[in-house]
Amino acid sequence: MDTIASLFSFITTPVSWVIVQFHSVYGAIFGPDTGWAWGLSIVSLVILIRICLIPLFVKQIKATRAMQTLQPEMKKIQERYKNDRQRQSEEMMKLYKETGTNPLSSCLPILAQSPFFFALYHVLNSIASNDTVGVINERLLESAQKAHIFGAPLAAKFTDSSDKLEALNSSLTDVRVVTAIMIVLMSASQFYTQRQLMTKNVDTSVKTPFMQQQKMLMYVFPIMFAVFGINFPVGVLVYWLTTNVWTMGQQMYVIHNNPTPGSKAQAAYLERLSKHVTRHSRTRNRRERAIVKAIVAKGRDRNEYERKFINGLNKAGLAAQPDGMVIKSESTAVAQAEDGTATGAAPKRQQPKRQSKSQRQSGPAKAAEESTTSLTKSGGPEDTKPASAAKKGNAKPAGSTRSKAQSGQRKGPQRPKSPSKK
């Protein structure tokens, strides 16, 4: 680790200068030799670095989503050229070039942050070795060695011996308890950040090896932090814990407000957006208009959650426009009365009540009886039989009924018996 830190010694002076400037501010509040002054200086260094890395973080999000979109095409290339590794690599590079994606873009924040991390490690290691470094002179070196965070010196490690810790005015128990707690928190924050990404902000409709790789990293990274953390000084643990918490909060904000298409986070976001747009009949800011515009532009390529969002607006009498605006739709809008109150939509079609078998059989006879009764009351003729039928000599009387079927015979027309063969 010392060799790696020495490679980034060119940035040691700027890092030490930033720490000293923050220390002068916090030292005036908490005291120059306190752990709060030096600890908050390291935390402020992390915040300053992460603010400067926000553009790279945005590129990381775009690169990660582009890689997720390309996974089906990459899988086809792997299956097509599974026996030719060179051709497979050439096709992959061609795909990256055509789509303008870069696999290393997802690692840009970590790569850009690593020089500051190793420079800070070199500064704290020099403080533990009683060596001046950068702009930290002997007076500041003595002040940093006196600084303790919950009883643990700023430059102490989990693996330090008791003699070395006594020279830093601390005990082995205090240092190991503090460093163990910080290592656990550091690993837990890393695990939660990766798990949140995998469970909420990944397109669940695409099952690719990339997702399996990310799931594996969800367990590998915390173990790596736990293994290497025992060799980090307390100040470096403060640095890494702070940057993990920052990453977790930054990712929560992105998942909540700009989720990956097709993910569970997008379903929750579109549900919230649908409720707000339905209530106010409009989009409230430029970001929401951009999201609605992107959904409308997809057309038939919309995913399940986006189609549900558009259908919800249509049911509410609203229509999403290509420019991202939402207006009332005349075809499905709720009718308004003269006083301005909603009259409601058309009444729902009611299903007829189910009738029993006896009611269905008695229905025609009952209808005929009711029609006869109505004619009698209105003064019409009671006998409605046509005159032509009355003239026929073989016509049966109106009151006659069919003869009942004999016992043992079926009702209705009978099939003629075939002549018996003698």
Image (cartoon, grey):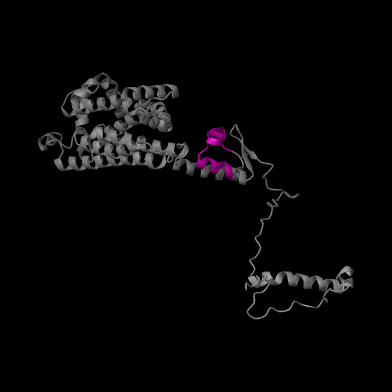
Left or right, 272 with reference to 215? right
* Rendering coords of residue 123 (x, y %): 23, 26
The quadrant holding residue 155 is top left
The quadrant holding residue 124 is top left
* Rendering coords of residue 350 (x, y %): 66, 59
Q: Bounds of the magenta span? A: 283-312
Q: Is residue 349 above or below residue 33?
A: below
Q: How many marks?
A: 0
Residue pictured at 88% horizontal, 68% vertical = 388
The quadrant holding residue 153 is top left
Looking at the picture, tell me which residue is in the foreground, 272 or 388.
Answer: 388
Looking at the picture, tell me which residue is in the foreground, 389 or 122.
Answer: 389
Q: Is residue 286 above or below residue 268?
A: above
| Rendered-image quadrant of the N terminus | top left
Residue furthest top as drawn: 10
* Rendering coords of residue 73 (x, y %): 42, 30
Left or right, 356 with reference to 271? right
* Rendering coords of residue 348 (x, y %): 66, 56
Q: Is residue 64 visible?
A: no
Residue furthest left as drawn: 163
Dominant SS type (magenta): helix
Residue furthest bottom as drawn: 407
Left or right, 90 with reference to 129? right
| Rendered-image quadrant of the C terminus | bottom right
Looking at the picture, tell me which residue is in the foreground, 245 or 389.
Answer: 389
Per the image, is 88 magenta?
A: no
Residue pictured at 83% horizontal, 71% vertical = 374
Q: Is residue 4 visible?
A: yes
